[in-house]
């Protein structure tokens, strides 16, 4: 959304509609791929959360003693801290996944809005390109802001992961 621009020229308007349509079609498959990855992330978060709860609640459980020995953790205090950090990590990742779904939904609606501005009932009209450009100009800053917030969240999660290593 933040990178697409229409080239305004009287001799290329038809090709710009074709290019937008290709972009729109491609975005649908990309969207589904991202939704699948987000669901995978949620599944992994659930598993990590269950482990974090087990570690925090019963760090001396037999199954975890071997893991702690491999990690060089021999103190209940450090084991409990690991469980807490894993819990924080999964909470942040859940939040990240929720934000990603919201971003995808907003992107889908914005693209539909632009497509509908270009025409209705499966048609797109070159004379509507300036209206679509106006929408791109309106949506662009909002999506840029979302991208920045997502990058910051990703950085925070990566920092937390690095702390766990």
Image (cartoon, rainbow, N blue to C red):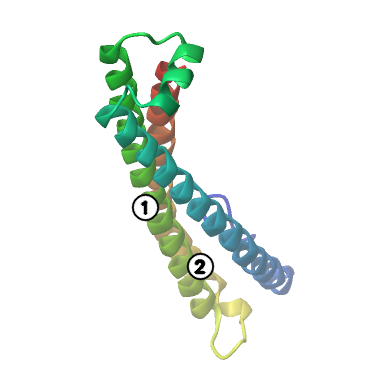
Q: Badge 1: few (under 14), some or many (20 or more) residues near its Cα, within 10 Å?
A: some
Depicted 48 relative to depicted 130: above or below? above
First in residue order: circle 2 vs circle 1:
1
Marks 2 and 1 sit apart, C-alpha to C-alpha, by: 20 Å
For residue 147, say whether it is visible.
no
| Secondary structure type for disc 2 | helix
* Residue name at image x 49 percent, y 73 percent: 112
Picture quadrant where residue 121 is located: bottom right
Q: How many marks?
A: 2
Which residue is tagged 1?
A: 98
Whole-percent x, y for residue 140 in the image: 44, 53
| Secondary structure type for disc 1 | helix
Which residue is tagged 2?
A: 111
Q: Nearer the viewer, residue 114 or 39?
A: 39
Whole-percent x, y for residue 26 in the image: 67, 63
Q: Nearer the viewer, residue 6 or 114?
A: 114
Depicted 9 relative to depicted 67: above or below? below
Picture quadrant where residue 92 is located: top left
Q: Residue furthest bottom?
A: 121
Q: Badge 2: few (under 14), some or many (20 or more) residues near its Cα, within 10 Å?
A: many
For residue 56, say whether it is visible.
yes
Depicted 34 relative to depicted 96: above or below? below
Q: Are marks 2 and 1 in contact (CB under 8 Å)?
A: no
* Residue name at image x 43 percent, y 34 percent: 154
Picture quadrant where residue 120 is located: bottom right
* Residue name at image x 49 percent, y 78 percent: 117
Name the front one of labels 2 and 1: 1
Whole-percent x, y for residue 91 in the image: 31, 40
* Residue name at image x 40 percent, y 46 percent: 46
């Amino acid at each position: 959304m933040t990178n697409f621009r229409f080239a305004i020229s009287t001799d290329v308007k038809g090709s710009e509609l074709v290019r937008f349509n290709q972009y729109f079609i491609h975005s649908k498959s990309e969207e589904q791929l991202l939704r699948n990855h987000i669901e995978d992330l949620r599944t992994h978060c659930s598993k990590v959360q269950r482990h974090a709860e087990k570690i925090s609640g019963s760090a001396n459980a037999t199954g975890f003693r071997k893991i702690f020995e491999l990690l060089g953790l021999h103190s209940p205090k450090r084991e409990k801290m690991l469980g807490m950090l894993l819990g924080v990590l999964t909470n942040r990742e859940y939040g990240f996944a929720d934000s990603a779904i919201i971003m995808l939904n907003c992107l889908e609606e914005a693209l539909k809005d632009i497509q509908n501005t270009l025409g209705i009932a499966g048609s797109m009209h070159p004379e509507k390109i300036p209206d679509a450009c106006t929408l791109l100009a309106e949506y662009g800053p909002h999506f840029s802001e979302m991208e920045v917030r997502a990058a910051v969240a990703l950085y925070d999660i990566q920092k937390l992961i690095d702390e766990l290593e």
